[in-house]
Image (cartoon, grey):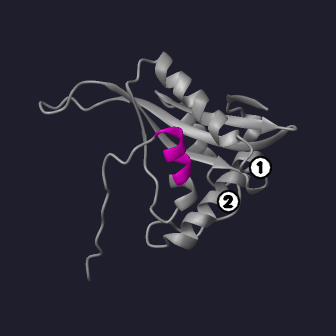
């Protein structure tokens, strides 16, 4: 398996996996996620995520196919009087194809992000995961992530 930075030639493979996770999110949280369009509609989003300052997308290639991808972004904590200044790395998403799950691909991609974050001087690696995604929560906890906050929401009756 090879983990490398995103290339334009990865479009079809990455968009297939993006569609997979977008469908899952829509099925579980239709309030927040729209029904995904056709595969490839979000390519510009992923490409821009990779090209913007501090952002990067890595792909895991197995047998010449995209088996997974991770999108992340480096940033500084906001300059507020009550926050300690620090660099952080936020993982936007980790996706592994259904047929390749439980083979160490997600862990390998996480380790690559961790290494990049460390090289850039980040002191914190964080992410957000929806509570319905129990397998992702278990995966992140196994890697050493802890629950440091709760994001809560409440619908407003119209």
State how many labels appear: 2
Q: Position of residue 149 (x, y in %)?
A: 30, 50
Does residue 135 lie above or below 64 as drawn? Answer: below
Pointer 1 residue: 100
Ranked by sequence position, the earlier of labels 2 and 1 is 2
Foreground of the two, 75 or 3:
3
For label 1, the SS is helix
For label 2, the SS is helix
Foreground of the two, 35 or 27:
27
Does residue 153 lie above or below 92 as drawn? Answer: below
Does residue 45 lie above or below 134 as drawn? Answer: above
Quarter of the figure that contains the C terminus:
bottom left
Please, which residue is most extreme toward the left here?
A: 81
User: How crowded is the residue under tag 2: few (<14 C-alpha within 10 Å), some, or many (20+)?
Assistant: some
Q: Is residue 2 left or right of residue 154?
A: right
Q: Residue at x 66, y 34 (%)?
A: 108
Q: Position of residue 141 (x, y in %)?
A: 49, 46
**Magenta span has 140?**
yes
Marks 2 and 1 sit apart, C-alpha to C-alpha, by 13 Å
Quarter of the figure that contains the N terminus:
top right
**Magenta-tinted stretch:** 138-144
Q: Residue at x 60, y 45 (%)?
A: 44
Q: Residue at x 43, y 50 (%)?
A: 128
* Residue 121 showing in the rendered view: yes
Q: Residue at x 78, y 36 (%)?
A: 61
User: How crowded is the residue under tag 1: few (<14 C-alpha within 10 Å), some, or many (20+)?
Assistant: some
Question: What secondary structure characterizes most of the magenta part?
Answer: helix
Pointer 2 residue: 20
Q: Is residue 67 left or right of residue 29?
A: right
């Amino acid at each position: 398996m090879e983990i490398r930075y995103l290339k334009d030639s990865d479009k079809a493979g990455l968009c297939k996996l993006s569609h997979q996770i977008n469908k899952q999110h829509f099925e579980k949280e239709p309030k927040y996620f729209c029904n995904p369009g056709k595969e490839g509609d979000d390519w510009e989003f992923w490409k821009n995520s990779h090209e913007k300052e501090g952002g990067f997308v890595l792909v895991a290639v197995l047998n010449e196919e995209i088996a997974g991808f991770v999108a992340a972004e480096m940033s500084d904590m906001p300059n507020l009087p009550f926050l300690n200044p620090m660099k952080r790395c936020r993982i936007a998403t980790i996706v592994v194809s259904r047929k390749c799950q439980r083979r160490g691909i997600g862990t390998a991609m996480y380790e690559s992000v961790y290494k990049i974050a460390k090289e850039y001087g980040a002191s914190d690696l964080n992410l957000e995961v929806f509570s319905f995604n129990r397998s992702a929560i278990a995966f992140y906890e196994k890697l050493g992530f802890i629950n440091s906050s709760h994001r809560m929401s409440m619908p407003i009756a119209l």
